[in-house]
Amino acid sequence: MRLFLIGWTDKDSGFYDVAVKLKESGHQIVYWSAFNIFKDIKESEFSGTIFHDSFDALGAKPAHGVDISGFLPVSMELVREFYETEVAVLTMMNKKYERFSIDERKHIYYSLLSYWFGALKKYKPDAVIFQLLPHTVFDFIIYNIAKKLKIKTLFFKLTTLGDRLFLLDDYKVYPSLLGDWRKLSKDFRLEDLSGDIREIYLRHKKGKDDDQGANPHVQYIHNTLSAYSNWNLIWKKIKVFFNSLLDLSVLRKIPQFIKKRFSSNLKTEYLNVQSPVDWNKKFIYATLAYQPECSTSPQGDIFVDQILMLETLSSVLPNDWVIYVKEHPVQWLPRGLNYFSYRYKGYYRKIAGLKNVKLVPVETSSFELIRNCVAVANVTGSSAFEAVLRLKPALIFGYEWYQDCPGIFRVSSSEDCRRTFERIKNGATHTDAQLINYLALVGRCTFRGYIDPSTRIDSPVSSKENAENLTRALLRKLK
């Protein structure tokens, strides 16, 4: 088969070896994009392959050697055909094109749509394989064009079950087998679970809330918090200062630092509107996702606007309930405290102004909130899955790997929320037996591996084994 490999980076995780194995299996690598592509790839081993650095792709620069003279500008009909893609991409551009106006973003989008529509029509791949769920502007455009042209799409999706991976063709649809836990004539036993999944399940059931190995997302949070604390933070600031001295930008940055230090910022705004938790109230625990990230764009669809999620919940909330909202614990670290597109000035004040909605201190224990809440709500975050493992119901507004899990309610409107709240008030429950059935089926739909350095930290799978596992899954799907 003729293959496009998109975002196919990270040699240390075995992805270069996967490409070699695909080629040895008779597949032709027609097109390959990756970040810093020439660092890891020996072009001589892939004769005839078009290589495209992903930084160039993000900047709407064509791959070297691709003749674009026949790639026509987009038509009105083509733009209309992909209007949903455009809406999502304009939001994704908050990450790489934050300072660009809407008109500039639209022009880049039209250029990318023209280029990739032309490239897919010209080189006619049988399948496009992404390393991750497409969410970096150009790869999401490729994904949607391929869908429209009936070209097979594949990508790896990490779960919050250790190093368990799905290989999917659509981020909105998971294997139908996962819904079969409702139809099983005989329950699985705990002993039937794969050893790694059983261990994670038991950790949660025993209340080991701070155990990092049970959840790569928790590991990521711990790593980020550590990177921005104590001596690590001091060392980062020292490096920034000396680099500023070298490039003479220190004179510009000092006034910016003083302004940021003594004027309103994300943290001060949050602190000014936060409220203590009243544990005696019935409450929904709603978590804000870190942004920008694929967990809200594209997985959240319109609920990439997380205030819309909270407005939807608030609009039908029972009168004697409240919604406690907590910011993601690392939201203020990598980007700093400046307001930006996803957290603009007044963002937290707007949330705190919603009916029966209160922001709670970030240091409040998430697991304590889960234990005492009526239900959890988020777009696609890990807290929803952590809740159902503790036999608490959860509402999710996006598309996530656990969307078929017992105790999960996928909602997309106020009416959906109203019906779900009624079911919860009437005692809607799920059981450990149902969870074990579901997890047993997850074990049959997934395999062990990792897709980037941050997810391989605690995995016992070697780079060689990872490449073999990824290749085996791909060859099975391509066959």
Image (tube, rainbow, N blue to C red):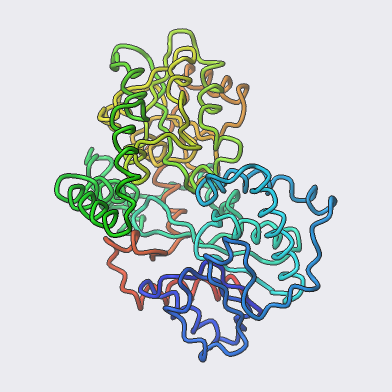
Residue 72, image quadrant: bottom right
**Quadrant of the snapshot with the N terminus:** bottom right
Residue 106 lies, in percent from the top left, at 68, 48
| Residue 432 found in image quarter | top left
Task: Report the quarter where the C terminus lies.
Answer: bottom right
Q: Residue at x 83, y 55 (%)?
A: 75
Q: Where is residue 216 in the image (x, y as percent from the top left)?
A: 33, 52
Is 226 left or right of 298, judged from the image as shown? Answer: left
Q: Of 404 and 7, which appears nearest the observer?
A: 7
Q: How many marks?
A: 0
Q: In this rendered view, identify the residue nearer to me: 413 or 388.
A: 413
Snapshot quadrant of residue 253:
top left
Examine the rendered structure and indicate whether residue 390 appears above or below residue 110. above
**Residue placed most toward the observer, 475 or 116:** 116
Above/below status of 445 relative to 265? below
Q: Position of residue 9 (x, y in %)?
A: 46, 70
x then y, percent, for residue 32? 57, 75
Q: Which of 175 and 268 is in front in this view?
A: 268
Q: Is residue 318 above or below residue 383?
A: above
Q: Which residue is drawn at 49% across and 15% down?
A: 354
Direction top: furthest residue: 319
- Residue at the extreme left of the image, as rendered: 231
